[in-house]
Image (cartoon, helix red, strand yellow):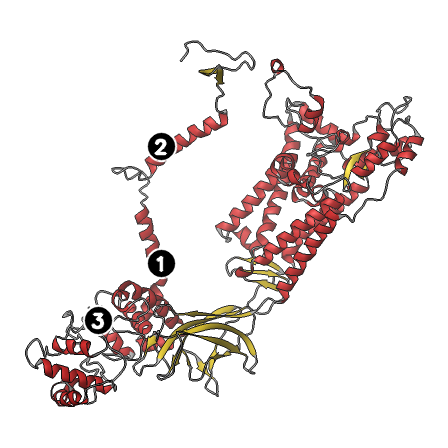
Amino acid sequence: MSTIEAPHRAKADRPLQTPARVEAQALYADRQKVYPKRVFGKVRSVKWAVLMLCLALYYVVPWLRWDRGAGLPDQAVLVDMTNARLFFFWIEIWPQEIYFLTGALILGAFALFAVSSLFGRLWCGFTCPQTVWTDLFMFVERWIQGDRNARMKLDQGPRNANWWTRKALTHAVWVVIAAATGGAWIMYFNDAPTITRQFFTGEAGVTVYFFFALFAGFTYLLAGWAREQVCTYMCPWPRFQAAMLDENSLVVTYRDWRGEPRGKAKADNVGDCVDCYACVHVCPTGIDIRDGQQLECIGCGLCVDACDSVMGKLGRPKGLVAFETLKNLSASAAATAGMAPGLERQTAGMAARELPRFIRPRTIMYAGALTAVALAMLLAFLLRSTLDVTVLRDRAPLYVRLSDGGIRNGYTVRIVNKRREDTPLVLALRAPEGFRLDVQDADHDAEGRPLLARRADGISQYRVLVTVPPGQRLPESTPITFRLLEPGGQLATSQSSTFQAPRR
Amino acid sequence: MPTKIEKDTLSGQETTGHEWDGLKELNTPLPKWWLWTFYATIVFGLVWMVIYPSLPFWRGTSGWIAREAIVEEVRAAEARHAPMMARLREATPAAIQADDEMRGFALAGGRIAFANNCAACHGAGGQGAVGGFPSLADDEWIWGGSLEEIQHTIRHGIRANESDEQRMSMMPRFGADGLLTSAQINDVAEHVLSLTGRATDTAAAGRGATIFAEQCASCHGERGEGNREFGAPRLNDQIWLYGEGRRAIASYIHNPRMGVMPSWQGRLDPAVVNMLTVYVQSLGRVN
C-alpha cells in the first residue's frame, strides 16, 4: 500500500532501528480507490432501512404543515432568518433563546457518547450524513457501472465510449442527488412551496442560490469523491471516540481465536477463516477487519454480512466477524488457547462469552448527564416566559428637579411579547406613597390607569416618567417595581428598578 | 558558506553548512505547497496594489475608494428614509406626535440629531447645566414649552442675531451700568429669595420688594412668576439657571449674562427640526 504505516502496526512490527537504517518516509499517502462489493444480509437490510428513514426525514420535514393562524408561516419546521424566529411545530424560539439550540446540541453530544460506549460506532456506520449519502452515491455507482469487479475492470480498461458513457451517467445522477440535497436545505429556511417555485423562476435571493450551491457542491464532493477520506482524515469524531469505547462496548470484530490459522476450506487443521477476502471487498473504507480495531473502521458491519454469507455456504456457524465486545473476545481467546481448530474450539470459545455489561460507571455517567441536561432543558422550556418587561432607567440625567421642587425620573419600558395576544396591559407602580406614574402616548382605562399596547409576537416600547412631589424625604435610591397587569387585574409580569434622588 | 554542498552521512540530506559544537544543521526546505502559496500571496498582493488605492499617489485602476463607498451607503440610507422625511417635513409637530409611525421615527431620529447638535450645551439627556444652559427635561420653559413654541425657538434661536424672528430680550446690567447700587442689588436678591421663602433678612427683602416692583416686575412679574413672552424666567420656583443662593442672584443682577442659542433653520433640514421638537418635548412631557 503506502510507505507510511498505521501507528498501531508500526509499533509492534518494527524493531528498534539503528540510525544507519533510517529510511525516508513519505508523509503523504496516495489514496487507494475503494471498490466496495455489493452485499446482502441483516446488517445491510438495517442499513438500507436507516438510510431511507434518514433521507425521508430530510426531504419530507420541510413540507410538513402546521397551522399557526393568519399571517404566520404554516411550515412545521422553519428557521425564519428575516423575522429572526425559529419554528418547530408548536414551539417558537426568539433569538435570545438560542440556548435551547445549545442545549439540543449538548443533548446530541451526550446521546452520541452514550450510544458509542454501549454499541460502538453506530452513528458513524448508520446515521452520519456522510455515510448515508456516500452509501446512496455508491448505490448509484453500482447500478450504472456494475459491481466491484466490473468497476475495477472499467477503470483499468481503455477510456472508450463505454467508459465515458457510464462515468458521465454516474456523475450526472450524483449531481442531481446533490442538487436535491442543496435544494432541500434551503427549504428549512424558507417556505418550502414558495421557495421551490421562486427557485425555478429565478426569483429567489442570492443567499438562497449561494447556500443551494454550497450544499449541492459539497454533497457531490464529499459523497462522490472524498468518501472514506472524510471519516479517516477530516472528521474529528473518530479521533476521540476511542475515549468513549471500552472493553464492554459492542464493536465490529473478527473472532481470531476461531478463524486462525487461515487456510483453504478443505485443508486440515486450519481455522474457520478461509481467507476469501469477502470482508475486505465489501468494506466501504477499504480496510481488513481481521487486522483488529482500526481508526478507519466506521462500524457499519457490512463485513459481518459478507462473512456470514460465506460461512453459510460452507455450512459453518455464522459470526466469525460479528458485533462483539473486546472483553468477550479476550475471554474466548483465553478459553481456547492451545486448542486445535475445530467444532470443539468453537463451542468452548462461544461458551466463554458473557452478555455485554450495559450498566457500568461510564454508561451510568453518560445517562446521568443526558438526563440532567434533558431535565434542565425541559424545566427551562416549561418555565420559559412568554411575556417580559424590561425597564431602562435614564442615566443622563439621573433625576430632574421640577419647578415646585419635586423630583422626576425617566424610564424606558419595553414589553417583549412572545404570545399571539395583543390585548393591552395595565402598567402599575409598586412604590412608596406619593409616587406618580405617567406613560407618554398611552391610552387609559376607565379608572385612569395607563394601558400599554403589546404587539403580538413583538416588542413595544414606552417612555415612562415617575414623579415624586416636593416635601417628601427621599433616600438617594428608592427601590420601585413596575408591574404589568392583565386587564382582569392579575399580575402578568414585573420588573424592579430604582428611583434616584439628589444626595441630601 | 561552504562552496561545495555537503551531505549528511546518516540521512543523505543536504546540510546548511552551519555547525555548532560538531552538530550540523540539516537543510530541510519548505514544503512545495507552502512555498507556492507564499509566492501566490505575493502575486495577489501586487495585483491588489494595482487594483486598489495602495500608495499615496496611486488611486488604483478600479476607482474604488473607501470614502466613496461610505458616501454611497449614506446616500442609500437617506434614499430609504426619504419618503418618511418628506412626510415629517410637511407635517406639523402636533401631527407627528399624534401619528404612531411618525412619532416613533421622530423620537429615534430626534435623539440622534439632539446628540449631534444640542447635547454640547443641553447635556446628553437634555438635563442642561448651571450657567445658562436650561434643562429641557423639567417642567419649566423660559420661552414656552408647547410644540409650536419649541419649534419656533429651535428654528430662530435666541439672541444670536441670525434670524429676524429670533427670541430676543435684554435684561439691564443693573450693577455694571450703575442703575442700582450694590446695597440695592443685595436687597433685591434678598427679595427674590423671599419669593421661595428663603430670605433670612426680612428688612432687606422689604427694601428689595420696592425696587423689584419698579425695576423687575414688568418682565418677571409682580410675584416673580416670569413671562415667557420676553423669556423672563420664573423666579418663584426651584429651578435656577445660573445657580442658587444670594451670591449667584446678586451677581446676575449686577451683570446679566443672558444665554444665546443659534438659529437652526437653514442649518438643519426642516424635518430634523420637527423631529427635534417632538423629541425635546418628550424628555419631560406628562399627560
At x 35% / y 84%, what residue is drawn?
A471
Q: Looking at the image, which is closer to me, A414 or A63? A: A414
Q: What residue would you read off at disc 2?
A: B46
Q: What residue would you read off at disc 3?
A: B131
Cα distance, mark 1 to mark 2?
34 Å
Which label was assigned to residue B77?
Answer: 1
**Sequence-first disc among 1 and 3:** 1
Query: Are discs 1 and 3 both within one chain?
Result: yes
At x 15% / y 69%, what residue is drawn?
B162
The answer to whether the residue labelled 1 contacts the one labelled 3, judged by CB atoms less than 8 Å apart, is no
Q: Position of residue A160 (x, y in %)?
A: 64, 25
The answer to whether the residue labelled 3 contacts the one labelled 2, judged by CB atoms less than 8 Å apart, is no
Image quarter (top left, top right, bottom left or bottom right) of the C terminus of chain B: bottom left
Specify the amino acid type for callout 1: Ala
The kind of secondary structure element at disc 2 is: helix
Q: Residues within 10 Å of mark 1 (few under 14, many from 20)?
A: few
Q: Position of residue A145 (x, y in %)?
A: 70, 32
Q: Residue furthest top?
A: B4
**Sequence-first disc among 1 and 2:** 2
Please give the chain letter of the residue carrying mark 3. B
